[in-house]
Amino acid sequence: MTEHWQNWGRSVENHPQRIEYPASTAEVSGLVREAVAAGLKIKAVGASHSFTAIAATDGILLKLDRMNRILGHDSATGRVRVQAGISLHELNPRLKALGLALPNLGDVDPQSVAGAVSTGTHGTGGKLFGIAKTVVGIQLVTGDGEVLEIDEQHEWFGASRVTLGALGILTEVTLQCVPAFLLHAREEPMALPEVLERVEEFTADNDHFEFYWFPHTEKALIKRNNRVPGGTERKPVGRFRHWLDDEFLSNTVYGGLNRVVARKRGWIPRVNTMAASMLSAREYVDDSYNVFVSERTVRFRESEFAVPRAALHDVLAELKSWFGAGHENISFPIEVRFTAADDIWMSTGHERDNCYIAVHQYVRSDYESYFAAAQDIFTAHEGRPHWGKIHTLDASYFAERYSRFHDFVSVRDKVDPGRIFSNPYLDRVLG
């Protein structure tokens, strides 16, 4: 009798033969050896928050929820060793208790450390990087059940931080943290032409900058987050304002509107104008992770590509032309974020400063035509898709976009020659 697994975005489901819940590296190693002996594939999954089938398997599925301990920390260096199944939601307050924090985060936090690292979760910050850049050591169970330790001196370090789950099961991670910090958050509506005119200024002058554009309108919401001097007091969003903005308007009302316009798509341009007009400016000071992370209860599907920063204006203009041609009405805002170039072989930020452009579709609406059109625009500008978000590209494309692609595949050949960790998604993107 097979099991059932489905991801958060309801875009992937499958039926593994078994689902296991290991609590230690030794248990993971034993399960890998069992899979090899039985001729089964084996994959690990964290929060199931990827929109692709990157973690799917018809063999043995490992849920790493029980691997959620902090194993050790060094206050002098800021390095913290964790089991890879710990979620960012669990980790962030526990780091704060140690006087530490991750320097950058994405805008949601249910992902496991293993999933966030392996798929290249990035956040925003023109001079900052994704979560994988904080990794200084990993423990990996390879295709024969052996346990491999990789640190900054290891020849495969560049391959080990964004692995797509193709090199093995990530069981422990050492993170380079920073002292805990507060962020001053400023959020305000702004006309899209002004945002685009000032985007270089906003990116250069703020630690973290992002904006949301409402399709079929000229309206946007900008977010600027900056570190504050030591000794500054927290001034979080008031309880009522938090409920109104983050729970009622952003989730309850927004979810209800999307349920309506999923059936009445002609209403979407007016609804987007109304939704954008409901936004108001606000400022607050809070722990970094409370500012980075937003609550998301409205389910959606997502595709996101990294493109060179110079391409931003052209990409948004081409998306606007597609909307203007009447192909489809889109209710979800388009999210734009920024990161600096890194040295991780399969990171979307490898050797390139990027802007990230994310398109979304409500879970009850078909996403394929919209995402296909967006992908054509992104790839025309050398776009690299987020590994956990929807795309249809294959190894021939990635071999042209990543200078270390073949080196990564060579490491894969060494640590998983039998392809025990593979699945159709990895066969497509890595060959």
Image (cartoon, grey):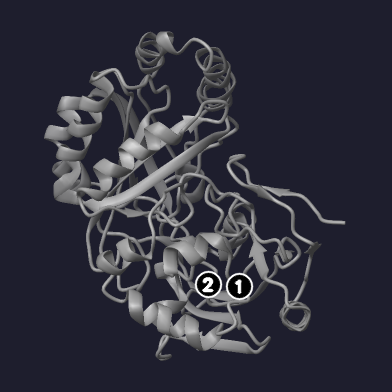
Q: In this orientation, which residue lies closer to the viewer: 14 or 191?
A: 14
Q: Residue at x 32, y 36 (%)?
A: 373
Q: At which x and y percent is residue 156? A: 42, 86
Q: In this orientation, which residue lies closer to the viewer: 236 or 243?
A: 243
- Viewed as shown, does residue 81 lie left or right of 211? right
Q: Residue at x 55, y 16 (%)?
A: 253
Q: Residues within 10 Å of mark 1 (few under 14, many from 20)?
A: many
Q: At which x and y percent is residue 96? A: 56, 58
Q: From what the image shows, is residue 246 above or below residue 78?
A: above
Q: At which x and y percent is residue 333? A: 38, 28
- Tell me, yes or no, if residue 156 can be seen here: yes
Q: Secondary structure at mark 2?
A: loop
Q: In this orientation, which residue lies closer to the viewer: 174 or 331?
A: 331
**Quadrant of residue 296 within the rendered picture:** top right
**Residue 421 numbered mark, or none:** 1
Residue on which disc 2 sits:
166
**Residue 344 numbered mark, or none:** none
Q: From what the image shows, is residue 156 above or below residue 296?
A: below
- Viewed as shown, does residue 231 lie left or right of 93? left
- Tell me, yes or no, if residue 101 can be seen here: no
Asked whether disc 1 touches disc 2, contact meaning CB atoms under 8 Å apart, the reply is yes
Q: Residues within 10 Å of mark 2 (few under 14, many from 20)?
A: many
Q: At which x and y percent is residue 395? A: 37, 65
Residue type at mark 2: give it: Ala
Q: Residue at x 40, y 51 (%)?
A: 123
